[in-house]
Amino acid sequence: MEDNLKTLEKGSQILQQHDQWMAEHLDELIEQYPGKVVAISEGKIVKVGETYQEVYQAFLSSNVEWMPMVISVPYPDEVQEFLL
């Protein structure tokens, strides 16, 4: 039971870190990687590709403890729609 709680706490901490990183770096992602799929782990971009499958494939065969956050970066004009 204690291991499950530690795992849950670690997952929660990672999600909070991802959320904070996205809040600080979304503009940079949109400027540098519009339309790309990007994996972020431990506060840095670790893989950029065209599809989720392409990006995730690099991690499926490795023995990572936690999968990175993977997002599809919007184009600048797509973001404007959310701001209205």
Image (cartoon, grey):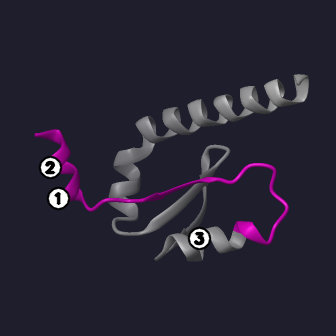
Q: Which class describes the residues within 10 Å of circle 1: few (<14), some (14-19), or many (20+)?
A: few
Residue type marked 1: Asp
How many marks on residues?
A: 3
Q: Which class describes the residues within 10 Å of circle 2: few (<14), some (14-19), or many (20+)?
A: few
- Tell me the distance, in whole angstroms, between the alpha carbons under discs 1 and 3: 24 Å
Residue 7 horizontal/vertical position (percent): 79, 33
Residue type marked 2: Glu
Q: Which class describes the residues within 10 Å of circle 3: few (<14), some (14-19), or many (20+)?
A: many
- Tell me the distance, in whole angstroms, between the alpha carbons under discs 3 and 2: 26 Å
The reply to whether dot 3 and dot 2 touch (C-beta < 8 Å) is no
Residue type marked 3: Val
**3 relative to 53 in the view: left or right:** right
Residue tagged 3: 55
Q: Quadrant location of the N terminus?
A: top right
Rendered residue at 10%/40% (across/down): 84
Labels 1 and 3: the sequence-earlier one: 3
Residue 60 part of the magenta-drawn span: yes
Rendered residue at 34%/47% (across/down): 27
Residue tagged 1: 77
The one nearer the camera, 82 or 42, is: 82
**48 relative to 79 in the view: left or right:** right
Rendered residue at 42%/36% (across/down): 23
The one nearer the camera, 67 or 46, is: 67
Residue 59 horizontal/vertical position (percent): 72, 66
Q: Which residues are magenta?
A: 59-84
The one nearer the camera, 31 or 6, is: 6
Residue tagged 2: 81
Residue 68 part of the magenta-drawn span: yes
SS at mark 1? helix
Outermost residue toward the right in this view: 2
SS at mark 3? helix
**Looking at the picture, does residue 74 appear above or below residue 51?**
above
